[in-house]
Image (cartoon, rainbow, N blue to C red):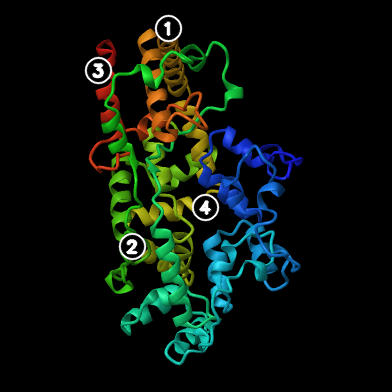
Amino acid sequence: GEDTGVPLKEDPEYAKYFKMLQMGLPMGAVKNALQRDGKDPSIMDLDHNKSVKSQTEGDDDEDDGPPLKEDPEYEKYFKMLRLKLPMGAVKQAMQRDGKDPSIMDLDHNRSVKSQMSNDADDNGVPLKDDPEYSKYFKMLKMGLPMGAVKNALQRDDKDTSIMDLDPNKSVAFQLNSRTRRKTKKSQKKKVRRKKIYWTPIDPTKVNEDSIWSLVKGTVAMDQLKYDMKEFENLFTESSNPADKKKKETSAGDKKPAQKKSVQVIEGKRGMNGGIILARLKIEYSKIAEMVDKMEYGNLDDTQLRALKEFLPNDEERPNLEVYLKKGESSEKAMAEALAAMSECEKYMVAMMRVKKAAAKFDCMLFKTQFQSRYDEIMEARNIVKNACEEMRASVRLRKMMAMILTVVNEINTGGTGNIAIGFSLDALLKLSEAKAFDKKTSVLHYLVKIVRENDKSLV
């Protein structure tokens, strides 16, 4: 019948997700946002110019059950999603509770019953009660992480992916269903595009005199000289790549941290502090007095920074206080305790009597560095100002940026869809990191080739 509903792209319930697309966010990120909000991400695969109702009604049996997101059995997991917990953590919680984590991949706005397949009856023993696997579910109930349980399965020469199945269904039933699903899916081939994850500029923030307004429409992909077959071989792939196995590092490979032998403070720190203090040739009580009054005398910023570095930290201060208790019985005992300390430790003891010593050092450093830092900032500011003026006036730069924008838009979208109007400069750094599907050619190398073939004056 005639579609009288609101088009999907104008539907108030989904408008914010289309706004995300208009801002240049990838479809994967938008679908993640839908899933986080408890909505069906497959909605974005429908026709954006037709209403949701016209595209979803009539395909399924009547659904008289509660929507999945409101189902009392699963509502706590949707609450976890609303608290911004990642989907992986939510699925692990479901598995720990003996529920099928794949439930979260269903349509959240429809009941579980209406979406569960009834292709065949499952007369087998549920996985969680299966004698062959029951001990592993017992480990989960005891609070062991899924990784440890899968390691135990691997140690017993069993398939670790068994733990990813529905605990309430038999193994045989699910493996047969999985085989059928894989056979159906293998018949479809998808074309994957290499993605350059740059940061597109929001079109509403582009001024008329910006570089992106000046280069808009100056370079089109069909105007460039390039080998279309080479482009497709490098940046598109017609079949899904095989899943790569993740390398797992066992806890046994990690070397235990070596215990450090110390007296009061760590030995190397004490030695470095002693070297610095020996060069100053100032009594530690005199230094403490200067810092307390914030009078740095002839000390420069390098020396002040070094002295601040060897103030006692939160771990060293209580250790020093405990050690000094040995000398509380008499002046002689205190003198002996201090004499046994390193030079750096003696300095720390003197500085412990100064209140807010670190803050006072910061004040003195600010004062000693102010003029030189001001001069540096002004010099850098003038350099940036001059560079910006030169860049804005450069015709070659405009041509180069327009060519980069056009080629990367072609790689990302094939020339249709969400075309970026501009990009942030940090995206240029990613061009050397992003590789084509041949694992050798970087996007930067390909761009250099295109530039050479089309305008050698830009090289």
For residue 246, the mark is 2
Q: Which mark is residue 393?
A: 1
Quadrant position of the C terminus in the picture: top left
Say which element carries label 1.
helix
Residue hosting label 3: 453
Q: Earlier in the sequence, mark 2 or mark 3?
A: 2
CA gap between label 1 and label 4 equals 60 Å
Name which of mark 2 and mark 4 comes first in the sequence.
2
Q: From the viewer's perspective, is 417 left or right of 191?
A: right
User: Percent position (x, y) of residue 423?
Assistant: 47, 27
What residue is drawn where x is 24% and y is 17%? Answer: 453
Q: Is the C-beta separation of discs 2 and 3 under 8 Å?
A: no
Q: Is residue 77 left or right of residue 400?
A: right
Mark 3: secondary structure: helix
Crowd band around label 1 with a 10 angstrom C-alpha radius: few (<14), some (14–19), many (20+):
few
Residue 91 in view in this figure: yes
Q: Earlier in the sequence, mark 3 or mark 4?
A: 4
Mark 2 residue crowding within 10 angstroms, few (<14) / some (14–19) / many (20+): few
Q: Is residue 54 above or below residue 215?
A: below
Q: Nearer the viewer, residue 342 or 56?
A: 56
